[in-house]
Image (tube, coloured by chain):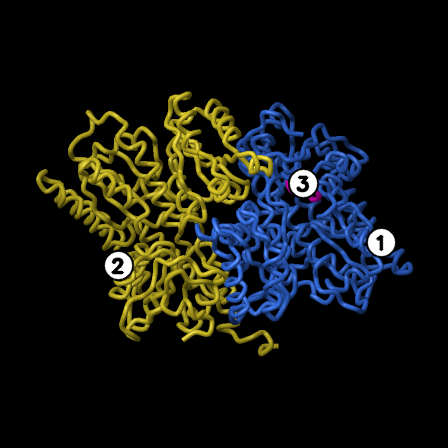
Amino acid sequence: MIEDDYVSTTNPCKVCSPLGVSLAVKGIEGAMSIMHGSQGCATYIRRYMISHFKEPLDIASSSFSETSAIFGGKSNLKSAILNVKQKYDPKLIAVSATCLSETIGDDVAAYCRECNKEVDGEILAITPPPFGGAHLSGYYAAVTSLVKEKKREKEKIQSLNIFPSIYSTADLRYLKQLVASYFDNFMVMPDYSETLDGGIWGEYLPIAPGGTPLKKIGASYLADFSIGFSPFLEDGINPGKTLESENGVEYFPLRPPIGVRGCDDLTQLLCKKSGNRTNQYYLKERARLIDAYADSHKYTFGKRAVVYGDADFVAGIASFLDEVGITPVICACGTPFKEFEKYIKSCLEFTAPEVIKADVDFKTLDDLLEGVEIDLIIGNSKGYKIARDRDIPFVRCGFPIHDRIGGPRFLHIGYKGAMNLLDHVTNTLLTAKQDASPVGYAYQ
Amino acid sequence: MSSSLLNERKDQVWIKSEKEGTLTCDKESLAGAVSQRACVFCGSRVVLYPVADALHIVHGPIGCASFTWDIRGSLSSGPELHRLSFSTDLKEKDVVFGGEKKLERALLKLIEEHKPKATFVFATCITGIIGDDIGAVCKKVGLKVGIPVIPVHSEGFKGTKKDGYKAACDALAKIVGTGDISQVPKLSINILGEFNLAGEAWMIQKYYEQMGIEVVSILTGDGRVEKISKSHGASLNVVQCSGSLSYLAKQMEEDYGIPYKRVSYFGIEDMSKALYDVADFFSDYPGVREKAESVVRDELSRIIPEIEKYKRILAGKRAAVYVGGAFKAFSLIKALKLIGMSVVIAGSQTGNREDYEQLKILSDPGCIIVDDSNPLELSDFVIAKRADLFIGGVKERPIAFKLGIGFCDHNHERKIALAGYKGMINFFKEVHDSVMSPVWNFSPRKFGQLGEIL
């Protein structure tokens, strides 16, 4: 995967795992994050996510000093918990380890257990893979910890659990709407569609309303089945697999619901499991999408794209491109997932990538692009520099998008999301064609 | 006063004319208080970032480098090496066995590839804890490659952002004094604490040049290693910003006998004073003061009518100011007064006792003065004081927007030049467009809750 002399990154294609933890926790009802480490970790994570979501993102820190770094951060963590309790009054406090607390060997889980006895409300420790991991692994580590460690409910509430990836708030809302047309009670976890996109306020709310209900998380082990969209996840950070092996909740690892096939997989499973409920609304949406595929096919067929970003997102986008005849020539992700290549290949039917590479930085991606003919770059804002330097049309999607408005509410998933993507991709290609033409075409 | 205030933080908030005594500051951030501050590493990175022909490598786990990749608005007139993000991306194995070898190999490879004029190696929390001897690696590599390879002792937990400024100054001090100063004229200065956001350093440099003064180096806006190496040849250091570069100014005074003056380039008053102060320093040279006056006169005649226009619209509006350094807050208060706006909240992340005393003098009665604040406090203050505008950084922006009030960025990420005379007009336009936008009329604060409408 990585060359032996690979000793540094130039322009990373990932962020750290505690960021993923914070994002997941933002999708839990009444929850608040504490970063157990230096003040900078919490502040940088807040700043980074604010630039994408453009929403308040309060994350507390145990604010390590030199003393805590040497003698351990237990007392700092305790005062952080008490202060957060006093001012934010969360229903759940999720304490994330950071590189620093992991390195000095602080037992965050033990500290939290101790505090649980003194503080009303739940305190959960989350230990993300700190080194070599990335935000996506932190995100799934948090979701897995929550379904494992959350205080158990006794009664079954929902029929199914859905574990989405790092999707946009519009994606999460669409997902909930879609599943609701098949099932009366289900859980999407995490769900930051309201907490990070809930509209304007009259006063500052310490914790934004919305999020996956805590009761549902506690009852997730009683559900009939779970769905996840990242089949390549390793054990320990795979919530669906964990519930299956430990609690016998049947797990369906589906391909990301981006494009017709991905969304078909999901609707077919929901349809079957719900006793063949069909839904005319989504059938019509699907029909309109196929119609749009026909309208666009001449502009998309045979085009060559680069796709990068979070592993499962890249798989979803590549699968969508494959459907409209665009070859995802280079597929790259910043995360070090071993199964990435195999998984990407399994998502494609009509096209074949030339390079599939995990754990890349943008320098590597730029090198891979050298001498390769490319019509389109698709990925998060971080690829802007490459797209600009190489003058290649660029479609922004995924996380993070911090040089455009609307990144977090861009719809990618479902039939409607595919339509959205198709229009963006086709129009970007058309703009390039129009700009390159000496006359410019008025009709297409 | 505010329900959001934690007991331990009570002494860090003060209302003008409410009570006597001093404001508590210079404290470590309270755990769990959701401080808006960053860390030591952040402080160092901010100061050194604009040195455009140096290689900046973060020795640590990936987050520290990812979060600081090209986030500043500092422009360069030439090389752009500073806009790339290099990291040793430490993994578990490196943490267990030490990362020195990896750092050495990374440095050799990157220096060969990018041919920088110098290299800064940033320590992080982790390299501090595992005890990597960054100094030794830098020395070894430096001897091999023949350029300065300088360790920056910016371990995140070792204090606040301010301590990071000091670490950056220590690193810069290793370049200062290494260059040939035989060609440096007497009528010359260094500009310190100016980071060339949106080209501001170029504007300021031009003013000084119009006064016949040579600018030997700018630290660190549009920075070049060679210019920094000659900076000890200048006759005066002109220092902006609440002390980010004042450590270096003091060091240079000690080592090379170069006096320094603190200035601000923000606001008409402060900008003009910055030029006059420097002119007065060179009072032995004929014509400098006259040239300064002529620069100020020309620039003012251009912008005064514009300012009057904004004043007619904005007088009486109320602003909240919460910024990194207190010096910036002083200038903002003065500038806002110029268009008839009052400042109802003034605070900073890293002010010291003198700074807050100054804020007390500058502010209007009733103004809330706060040190190392957080979202809950700030939002409470904003509502209590019925502010029309918030001026701050990225983390404050969504607080303002959620509450339905205008916001102006005044931090290292902004893309609009706010310094100097032209910058003043940019700023007032920014304030005007933020406060007067019709969108705020739809916010619940002004329009009532949605429930009341429907």
The residue at which mark 3 appears reads as A443
| Proximity of marks 3 and 2: CB atoms separated by less than 8 Å | no
The residue type indicated by label 1 comes to Glu
Distance from label 1 to label 3 (Cα)?
A: 52 Å
Up-down relation of residue B55 to residue A172 (above or below): above
The residue at which mark 1 appears reads as A250
- Measured from the top left, where is residue A95 in percent x and y? 59, 57
Please state the extent of the stretch shown in magenta in the rendering: A309-314
Q: Chain B appears what colour?
A: yellow
Q: Are marks 1 and 2 on the same chain?
A: no
The residue at which mark 2 appears reads as B354
Around disc 2, counting alpha carbons within 10 Å, would you say few (fewer than 14), some (14 to 19), or many (20 or more)? few
Between disc 3 and disc 2, the foreground one is 2
The residue type indicated by label 3 comes to Tyr
Work out which quarter of the rendered image holds the N terminus of chain A and state it.
Answer: top right
Chain (blue): A
- Measured from the top left, where is residue B385 in percent x and y? 39, 72
Q: Are marks 1 and 3 on the same chain?
A: yes
- Measured from the top left, where is residue B71 in percent x and y? 47, 44
**At numbered mark 1, what does the secondary structure look like: helix, strand or loop?**
strand
Determine the chain carrying the residue at label 2: B
Determine the chain carrying the residue at label 3: A
Determine the chain carrying the residue at label 1: A
Residue B317 seen: no
User: On the picture, is B278 further left or further right than B444?
Assistant: left
